[in-house]
Amino acid sequence: MRAGRRCKNIPMTARVYQTEGIIIKKYKFGEADRLLTLFTADFGKVRAIAKGAMRPKSKLGGNVELLTHSQLMLARGRNLDIITQAQAINTFLPIRDSLELMSCGFYLSELVDTFTEESVEDREMFDLFLNTLKELAEARDGERILRYFELRLLSHLGYRPQLQRCSNCGKQLQQEINYFSAPQGGALCRECGYPDMAARTLSVNALKVLRLWLKCDFDTARRVKLNSELTREIKNIMRDSVKYVLEKQLKSIEWMDKLAAEGNHLPVKQDTSEPGHQ
Ligand SMILES: [Zn+2]
């Protein structure tokens, strides 16, 4: 399942190392410190302490906020590493200014956190995550970006859905309404899908979009026209797939759905107390 590899590039004797990272989780730690989970370019997921980050004059403060992409210097600690320097590369302000986009960002973070183990380098995952945050900040089309990310993430981790042939009988799929089943690992032909009560119908257009997204970059993915029906169909398919692989629903989904339903675009403060992130 894991696409990355254990990091061998930090000599155990090295006291200090540097890398780029995105803050995916933060907790209060003691009086003024923060315990952070970072997804880094060179060392995968790392947990580290940002000492004094909650003090008003801390140099770390704004550079170690959730979803911030920073250049970091870390020192090895006995149990947890310590962030000694942090310089923000991108704070993704447009995401911070919208509760709805922020909820999308939390969902992405939770996906990355849940699907990764500590200290397993995965540069491809880092690049996908970073590019997805950039897209989210620029395009402001959260739905499409999340779906593309989910599909590419599952594919990268070895759960690429079968979309050319029926996942059950292997028959080439026809240009007609087919079915999709997460437990079966992809699309089903009419004969196999119809009797499967857990399978969803899969329209010709949804199949086309998913096939394209599996092989195209964000520039192309962005140009695909999706009406609300197609958006909903792809959302249900990808949610089924993520939930099936994880064997659970993520916490951030509920909050994201609530905001999306309300069409909430209120500004969000830097230091919020979103579920599961404080
Ligand atoms: Zn079949």
Image: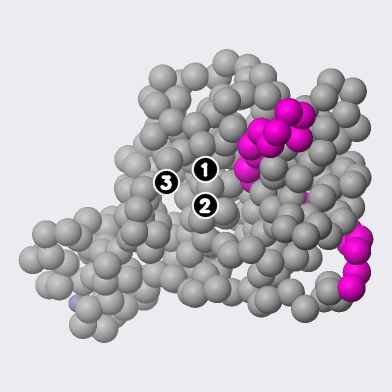
Number of disc labels: 3
The answer to whether residue 148 is visible is no
Q: Out of 247 and 107, give the one closest to the viewer.
A: 247
Q: Identify the magenta region.
A: 13-33
- Identify whether 118 is placed above or below 148: below
Is there a contact, CB below 8 Å, between mark 1 and mark 2? yes
Mark 1 or 3: in front is 3
- The answer to which of marks 3 and 2 sits earlier in the sequence is 2
Mark 3 = which residue? Answer: 250
- CA gap between label 1 and label 3 equals 8 Å
Residue 32 is one of the magenta-drawn residues: yes
What residue sits 27% from the left and 58% below the top? 202
Mark 3 touching mark 2, by CB under 8 A? yes
What residue do we see at 36% from left, 48% from top? 249
Residue 12 locus on image (x, y percent)? 84, 74
* Left-right relation of 110 to 22: left
Q: Secondary structure at mark 2?
A: helix
Pinpoint residue 84: horizontal percent, then vertical percent: 89, 47
Name of the residue lying farthest toward the left? 195
| Contact (Cβ within 8 Å) of mark 1 with mark 3 | yes
Residue 253: x, y in percent?
42, 39
For label 1, the residue is 107
Amino acid under disc 2 = Leu
Q: Which mark is residue 111?
A: 2
Per the image, is 248 magenta? Answer: no
By secondary structure, the bulk of the magenta-drawn segment is best described as strand
**How far across and down, in percent of the image, does residue 217 sit?**
63, 60
State whether residue 132 appears in this view: yes
